[in-house]
Image: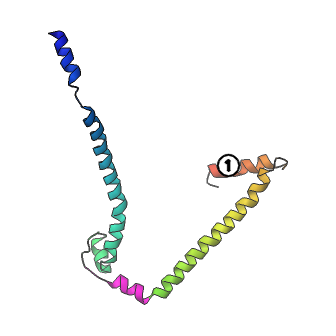
Amino acid sequence: METQNRRQAKKSPSLSLHARRVIPQYILNCVFILICFVCLYPLVLVVGISFTDETAIAIHGFSPIPKQFSLEAYRFLIREGASLLRAYGVTILSTVLGTICSTLVIALYAYPLSRPDFPLRKFFSRFVFFTMLFSG
């Protein structure tokens, strides 16, 4: 009798192999759905705000669903498109020039540090390391 109970216990485990594979998939899918919602909510919020009247935002705050529908933001973009393009041009120019200058300075600093015969190599290496530790 006791051996028969042991055989039945071995034949019917608490979770089948299929259930052990499916349950983690459901948990993983739920986690990814939550991450997707967290990533998409700001985009939906910005689109909702773009269609909301400015006074409604000041009174009610931000909402993905407009309290008072308005196309004034898009009218402003059409009217002031040239200044918007100028602002993007300044942003792109400063980004490109900043990247080029930063790369040039880092390359000019890194080359002497790569030379084993540079006498102040340890000092300048420690200087860079120290400023990285404390956000120099």
How many numbered circles does the render carry?
A: 1
Crowdedness of circle 1 by 10 Å Cα count: few (<14), some, many (20+)? Answer: few
**Above or below, 95 relative to 123:** below
Residue 91: x %, y % from top left: 55, 75
> In the figure, residue 41 lies in which quadrant?
bottom left
Q: Which residue is mark 1?
A: 130
Which quarter shows the C terminus?
A: bottom right
Residue at 17% x, 15% y is 5
18 in magenta? no
Residue at 30% x, 43% y is 25
Q: Which amino acid, by three-letter code, is at mark 1?
A: Phe
> In the figure, residue 100 lies in which quadrant?
bottom right
Q: As drawn, which residue projects farthest toward the bottom?
A: 79
74 in magenta? yes
Residue 35: x %, y % from top left: 35, 54
Q: Residue 106 vs residue 47: left or right?
A: right
Magenta-drawn segment:
68-79
